[in-house]
């Protein structure tokens, strides 16, 4: 049967090229074949859409859907759908969700791009991988910020403290997912100018029991690193640590090879610590701890370079120089308290920490006043022996105070503690012990003079 150029046959039924089938009372939609393509026009008159209801629109593998003049193509292969020839644009207010059928709410907002999943380590990962060949190029993530207010139209400069980007780490606290455990922020650190964008990097964490993040560390535009603080007028590039109200250690160095066991003072693998000398008054306590083993030097200073000053007056300085002063609490230097101790060496002796040597404000030096005496020694003879030894004459005869001759050399001085070892081995002089010997020699000489005076006075007639 034919009707208006349309032929209907029992088998098959077909329409000639460019002959359409109209649908609707007004012929609003048509379907026809133009010799190459099957064309569906949902809205010949008025408006309308091509809809598939209650069924699926299937695209065989290796087939494609072309848009426009074919400049954008949507094609299907087994397990994937590919769009080529153009970009994918999602209109404002809509979003892209990967791994789920709806957008989720985090931190009270609904992000427009989300990757959601419930399989650890597989379906909730984001990878940016660059296969760039023999060069140093890489994949990147860019955060941008403009004050223009018009998408795609930069040109309005930022101001100091504007945030350039932020990474927030959230966790489910049993109520919602609105509390951050940590946050990394980049902000403008100064005044921007043409091709000039000073920035700072801020690291924040949330303390136990808190609901908001607190800044812990920042790196500013000058390269300054701040922990517990945000600025230091006395520093441009360096490290500033503010421990707040805490009174324990502010700095510690550790090593997994160290286990000193002195855990009342420090963790067993900490070998260098710095803390306040006073909780409220400041000062510094430097603590160096080594193992209880064959370690003759626990703290060692090595200084190299410079040219030593030879001035032997109050203006002299040294390659190692200690400058000790007081201040008045009002930004002015003050003199050290009269007779105040400037330098003190203490040692643990007899279960107590005791001063063994000190230098005071006048430059006077004090050392332990030992109860040791030299009754078994002729102190004058020891002084003579010391003078001979240091001048190279290591053996000579001396006369003891008992009128006996004794053969003395370095051994006597070492035994008396005046020398720390033989001169050939670099033995040093114990200045404190030498002063004791000198004092003893003076005492012995005074005793002999008094004895001589007594004898002489007994030989002279009365009245002479």
Image (cartoon, rainbow, N blue to C red):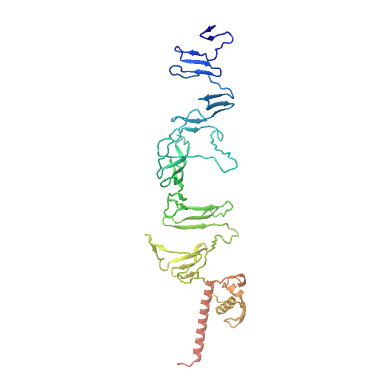
Whether residue 274 is visible here, answered yes or no, is yes
Is 32 located above or below residue 234 in the figure?
Answer: above
Task: Find the residue positioned furthest to the top.
Answer: 1
| Viewer-closest of 361 and 203 | 203
For the point 50% across and 87% down, the residue is 454
Where the N terminus falls, by quadrant? top right
For the point 59% across and 40% down, the residue is 133
Left or right: residue 285 compared with residue 405:
left
The x, y position of residue 96, in whole percent, is 49, 30
The x, y position of residue 248, in whole percent, is 47, 52
Is 446 located above or below residue 271 in the figure?
Answer: below
Q: Which of the 4 quarters of the picture holds residue 415? A: bottom right
| Viewer-closest of 47 and 159 | 47
The x, y position of residue 238, in whole percent, is 47, 53
Task: Find the residue positioned furthest to the left.
Answer: 330
Is 427 located above or below residue 131 in the figure?
Answer: below
Left or right: residue 65 compared with residue 277:
right
């Amino acid at each position: 049967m034919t009707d208006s150029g349309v032929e209907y046959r029992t088998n098959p039924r077909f329409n000639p090229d460019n002959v359409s089938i109209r649908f609707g009372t007004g012929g609003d939609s048509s379907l026809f074949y133009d010799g190459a393509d099957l064309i569906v026009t949902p809205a010949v008159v008025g408006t309308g859409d091509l809809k598939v209801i209650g069924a699926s629109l299937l695209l065989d593998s290796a087939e494609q859907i072309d848009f426009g003049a074919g400049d954008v193509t949507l094609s299907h292969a087994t397990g994937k759908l590919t769009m080529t020839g153009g970009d994918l644009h999602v209109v404002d207010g809509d979003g892209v969700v990967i791994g789920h059928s709806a957008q989720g709410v985090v931190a009270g907002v609904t992000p427009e791009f989300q990757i959601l999943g419930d399989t650890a380590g597989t379906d909730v990962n984001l990878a940016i991988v660059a296969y760039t060949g023999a060069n140093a190029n890489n994949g990147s993530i860019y955060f941008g910020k403009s004050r223009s207010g018009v998408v795609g139209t930069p040109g309005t400069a930022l101001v100091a403290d504007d945030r350039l980007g932020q990474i927030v780490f959230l966790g489910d606290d049993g109520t919602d997912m609105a509390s951050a455990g940590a946050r990394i922020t980049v902000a403008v650190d100064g005044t921007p100018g043409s091709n000039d964008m000073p920035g700072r990097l801020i690291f924040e964490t949330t303390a136990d029991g808190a609901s908001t993040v607190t800044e812990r560390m920042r790196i500013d535009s000058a390269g300054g690193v701040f922990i517990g603080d945000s600025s230091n007028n006395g520093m441009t590039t360096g490290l500033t640590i503010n421990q707040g109200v805490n009174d324990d250690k502010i700095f510690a160095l550790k090593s997994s090879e160290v286990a000193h066991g002195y855990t009342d003072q420090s963790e067993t693998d900490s070998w260098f610590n710095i803390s306040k000398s006073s909780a409220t008054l400041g000062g510094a306590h430097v603590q160096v701890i080594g193992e209880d083993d064959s370690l003759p030097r626990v703290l060692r200073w090595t200084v190299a370079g410079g040219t030593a000053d030879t001035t032997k007056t109050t203006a002299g300085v040294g390659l190692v120089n200690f400058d000790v002063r007081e201040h008045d609490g009002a930004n002015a230097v003050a003199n050290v308290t009269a007779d105040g101790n400037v330098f003190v060496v203490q040692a643990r002796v007899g279960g107590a920490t005791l001063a063994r040597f000190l230098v005071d404000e006048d430059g006077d030096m004090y050392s332990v006043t030992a109860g040791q005496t030299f009754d078994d020694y002729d102190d004058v003879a020891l002084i003579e022996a010391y003078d001979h030894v240091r001048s190279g004459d290591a053996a000579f005869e001396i006369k003891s105070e008992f009128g006996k001759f004794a053969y003395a050399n370095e051994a006597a001085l070492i035994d008396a503690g005046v020398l720390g070892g033989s001169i050939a081995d670099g033995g040093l002089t114990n200045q404190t012990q030498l002063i004791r010997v000198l004092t003893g020699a003076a005492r012995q000489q005074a005793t002999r003079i008094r004895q001589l005076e007594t004898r002489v006075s007994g030989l002279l007639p009365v009245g002479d």
